[in-house]
Image (tube, grey):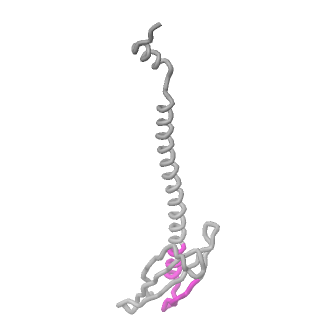
Amino acid sequence: MSFNSQNYSSLRTKLGLTLIEVMVALVIFALVASAIVKAAGDNLGGVGQIENITFATWVANNRLTHLHLDKTWPVENNQSGSEDMAGRTWYWQQKVEKTNDKDMVLVEVTVGTDKALINSVTTITGFISKN
């Protein structure tokens, strides 16, 4: 029985993939899968950071709203406190600066997760006027 190239090619197509072809396919799959896992991990990390910034911004806006509603003048400088939101305690500190208008001050509220505000999450600035 002679074995010619035409019989070999027809036999090869019936046998399926070679070991090298399978290994190349597995390498490509592994690269794609690792890229997808990295992208998903980065996305989840970003969601947590956005959540922290959102809650800290709400705490700062609540403080500015409280100052707008409070009729005490002048606004106290370096006042600090805490607020519970979303199952966590957020710490804030306000700094008051004079403006060119004697009936208006600039208030900067910094919010963080630690009492010393070493790792502040956000800072909001607003203006409070004397009513």
Q: Residue furthest right?
A: 87
Residue at 44% over, 16% down: 8
* 131 and 67: which is toward the camera: 67
Please state the extent of the stretch shown in magenta in the rendering: 59-80
Residue 83: image location, x then y, percent: 61, 76
Q: Which residue lies furthest to the top in this view?
A: 1
Q: Is residue 82 above or below residue 37?
A: below
Say whether residue 45 is left or right of residue 125.
right
Q: Which residue lies furthest to the left in this view?
A: 100
Assign the C terminus to one quadrant of the image: bottom left
* 14 and 54: which is toward the camera: 14
Q: Quadrant of residue 112?
A: bottom right
* 95 and 112: which is toward the camera: 112
Q: In which quarter of the image is residue 102?
A: bottom left
Q: Number of marks in the image?
A: 0
Q: Residue furthest front?
A: 2
Residue at 46% over, 40% down: 28
Q: Does the magenta stretch include residue 64?
A: yes
* 73 and 48: which is toward the camera: 48
Residue 54: image location, x then y, percent: 51, 66
Residue at 58% over, 74% down: 113
Residue 23: image location, x then y, percent: 50, 35
Residue 43: image location, x then y, percent: 50, 55
Q: Is residue 25 above or below residue 112?
A: above
Q: In this view, does 33 lie above or below 129?
A: above
Q: Is residue 19 above or below residue 32?
A: above
Residue at 46% over, 76% down: 124
